[in-house]
Amino acid sequence: MLVNADFHVHSCFSMASSKDMLIKNMAPKSKLKGLQLLGTGDAFHPGWLDIIDETTEYSGDGIYTFDDMDFVLTTEVEGKNRIHHVIIIPDMDIARELSQKLPSKNKDIDGRPKTRLDGAELFELVKEYDCLIGPAHAFTPWTGMYKSYDSIYDCYEKKVDFVELGLSADTFMADCVEELKDFPFLTNSDAHSPWPHRLGREFNQIELEDMSFSSIKKAFKHKDIKANYGLIPNLGKYHMTACTKCYKLIDPLLAKENRMKCSCGGTIKKGVDFRISEIADFNEPHHPDFRPKYVHLMPLAELISTVYDKGVTTKTVQGKWQRLVDEFGTEIDVLINVSLDSIKRIDQNIASVIESFRNNSIDVIPGGGGQYGKILFDNELNDKKAEKITTLDNF
């Protein structure tokens, strides 16, 4: 069966997460999104495990169910060198035992625990319990694995189960790195709130024999991910090299010359685009035969917000979002499956921007330095199709 799955989210116990990030809120919002399987996030936090235990029914083989929504235990761990790792866990007993074994001073405080273990040590620990593991948002400049290593094997020493791309990269970028031809790619939301424009903003369509941890493990092993859905990488907030204070896009070579200091006094962060170019083996992607399609999309509420220049959570945007979901079933169906003529009967403007995503004709001012990119429309900022990147001539 084909399942829409988002494996990387956070609970109310993670820093900077919404207090509403609870199972009782995540389940109904995930169903409206069009997901069938959601990671719990934060499954090394004892308090969160208690809530999962109290809220859900155990369906067997690693699956916990609430309100017809299925969950699998997952967590993100910050290891040595501030590298983040995603772990998918077989069941509650293993999660509790690993939580006790993980050397960490803050695992009872923060849903994303910090540990002194490096990637290889963490790999060995969780593999004793048959967990699945891979790098979180592998290329991002703050906490991605490739910020510290030029090879995934330098980090883990052995082959991990998957590579999570992150919001600022996609398959076309990652498949320029030859060593990644052996790994399935995951596209997950890293959501910190239960809004449908956060949950499932990136997701995986995966072929499962049944809803179980065993089937998830088998699907990764046999590379049965059938599609990855995610943002246009230019929209990611770390796609380009940019200042973290003024968000000016800056030529990476110039940034290095100036010791990653912007003329405004801010710190410049190397972009995912440039980092991949440093470790790439090919100028164009070399996709292995098993690599599924990568479909660019954007959360429906954010598209509506962009079209009407209103906040995502305003009555205008949420009203239009709700009408489309009520009419067509789920947000994912609206974005991917519903005919454009059907959407046009409800809102011509929204249909037009969805059509642009479907035919890859979206124009974007790229993001960087911690600021998301911006979609451009034909009638808007035509003379600013992309912000100029600061070079030696205009630094």
Image: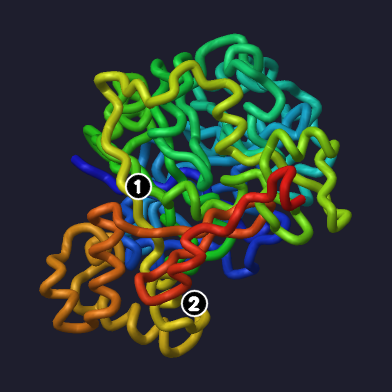
Q: How many marks?
A: 2
As helix, strand or loop, the secondary structure at mark 2 comes to loop
Q: Residue at x 15, y 69 (%)?
A: 340
Q: Nearer the viewer, residue 242 or 313?
A: 242
Which amino acid, by three-letter code, is at mark 2? Answer: Val
Residue 362, given in percent of the width and then of the height, sits at: 35, 59
In this view, 99 is above or below 11: above
As helix, strand or loop, the secondary structure at mark 1 comes to strand
In this view, 33 is above or below 80: below
Q: Please say whether residue 255 is visible from this viewpoint.
A: yes
Quick one: label 1 or label 2, which is nearer the N terminus? 1
Image quarter in which the N terminus is found: top left
Q: Residue at x 81, y 34 (%)?
A: 257
Q: Quadrant of residue 388?
A: bottom right
Identify the mark at residue 229; answer none if there is no mark: 1
Q: Quadrant of residue 372?
A: bottom right
Q: Is residue 81 left or right of residue 281?
A: right
Task: Give the crowd class for mark 1: few <14, some 14-19, many >=20 residues within 10 Å.
Answer: many
Q: Residue at x 68, y 51 (%)?
A: 369
| Distance Cα–Cα, label 1 vs label 2 | 21 Å
Q: Residue at x 49, y 16 (%)?
A: 281
Task: Give the crowd class for mark 2: few <14, some 14-19, many >=20 residues within 10 Å.
Answer: many
Which residue lies most toward the bottom here? 315
Residue 139, given in percent of the width and then of the height, sits at: 59, 34
Q: Nearer the viewer, residue 139 or 327?
A: 139
Q: Nearer the viewer, residue 25 or 99?
A: 25
Which amino acid, by three-letter code, is at mark 1? Answer: Tyr
* Residue corresponding to mark 2: 312
Which residue lies most toward the right here? 265
Residue 250, given in percent of the width and then of the height, sits at: 69, 47
